[in-house]
Image (tube, rainbow, N blue to C red):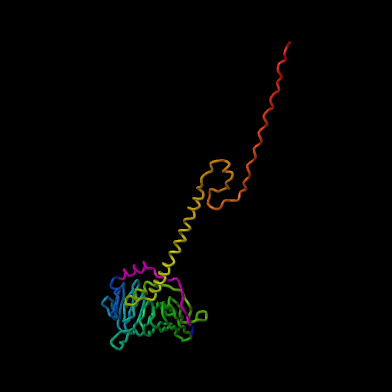
Amino acid sequence: MVVDHEAEPNCSLDRRGFVAASAALGAALLLPGVARSASVRLVEGSVRVNGKPATRATRVRAGDLVETGPDSKLVFVVGQDAFLLRAGSSLRLETPPTPGGKVATAGIRLDSGGLLAVFGKGRRLIQTATATATIRGTGVYLEATADQTYFCTCYGEVELRDKTGAERKLVVTGYHAPNMIYSHAVDGRMLAAASVKDHTDVELIMLDTLVGRTSPLARRQQAQEAETKSAQPEAVSEETATAAQPEVQSKRRRKKAPSHPAEAEALPFESSSAGPAPDVPVESAPKPNPPPPPPEPELRLPPARLD
């Protein structure tokens, strides 16, 4: 048996997307607390239960066949389990009564299409044409055809097996670990790792909300947000320091101009552009030539006296 521990694909929660999705599903979907047993919460497009059109008043019972047409979906709750059935799907539920009159999903079979589901405590069995999965308190997404099953353990614990019994895999994860289960071996394997597709954290959080639970994915998002906020002050200080550098350099360039040529000669070279000044040799000022000696006084004799 192979144990597949937590994976970290890029499937994060967008808070704005969660608000938009919640509004689209209507206020009735977001009521907290224990959900009503086998209650339909949303019907879009063509949805049939046992061949009859489904409405918000439809009750889903043990052994019922639920089918969705193109561009359709159904959101419904059974006890502490919540489901979102995609377009073009065929699903059969087994929901026998439990002691005390409570209702719980014992097992489901998805013959075709896609199903997103969150489950309360207890053991559940999920079957498709190619796979069998035993789950406990888990969020899952699966897509089924006659040849293969895509099965993502979104959080929790799932034991996957192919229908031949050749391989089985225990998946324990806190965040999306998808696998493919084939009807015939592919590259020598009946089970293989896959990539996350066609479902979101927003939808999973919404389904857990319908049954009065806080999704582990919501708690994960809150922890990430708290971590981001704690790191923000340091990032701001770095940005402030970076922004201040050009101003400091500008102040250095705005030095008082020398008032005397000799003073200018004594100053080192400073570039007008930002950055350190280049090393430029400063030549010493040429020494002035000594002034010429004053001309010697001309010797003049007194005029000769004539006797």
> Seen from this angle, which residue lies furthest bottom?
99
In the picture provided, is 175 more to the left or to the right than 73? right
Q: Tell me the quarter of the image containing the C terminus.
A: top right
On screen, 199 above or below 297? below
Expressed as whole percent of the image width and height from the top left, the position of residue 96 reads: 32, 87
- Closest to the observer: 226 or 104? 226
Expressed as whole percent of the image width and height from the top left, the position of residue 299 reads: 71, 23
Residue 63 position by quadrant: bottom left
- Closest to the observer: 225 or 150? 225
Residue 305 position by quadrant: top right
Magenta part of the protein: which range? 3-25
Give the residue at x 30% y 89%.
99
Give the residue at x 66% y 33%.
291
Give the residue at x 53% y 50%.
273
On screen, 268 above or below 1? above
Give the residue at x 63% y 42%.
285
Expressed as whole percent of the image width and height from the top left, the position of residue 141 reads: 40, 77
> Seen from this angle, which residue lies furthest right?
307
In the picture provided, is 283 more to the left or to the right than 158? right
- Closest to the observer: 54 or 157? 157
In the picture provided, is 238 more to the left or to the right than 119? right
Expressed as whole percent of the image width and height from the top left, the position of residue 10 reads: 45, 71
40 in the magenta segment? no
> Seen from this angle, which residue lies furthest left?
57
> Seen from this angle, which residue lies furthest front?
307
The mark total stands at 0
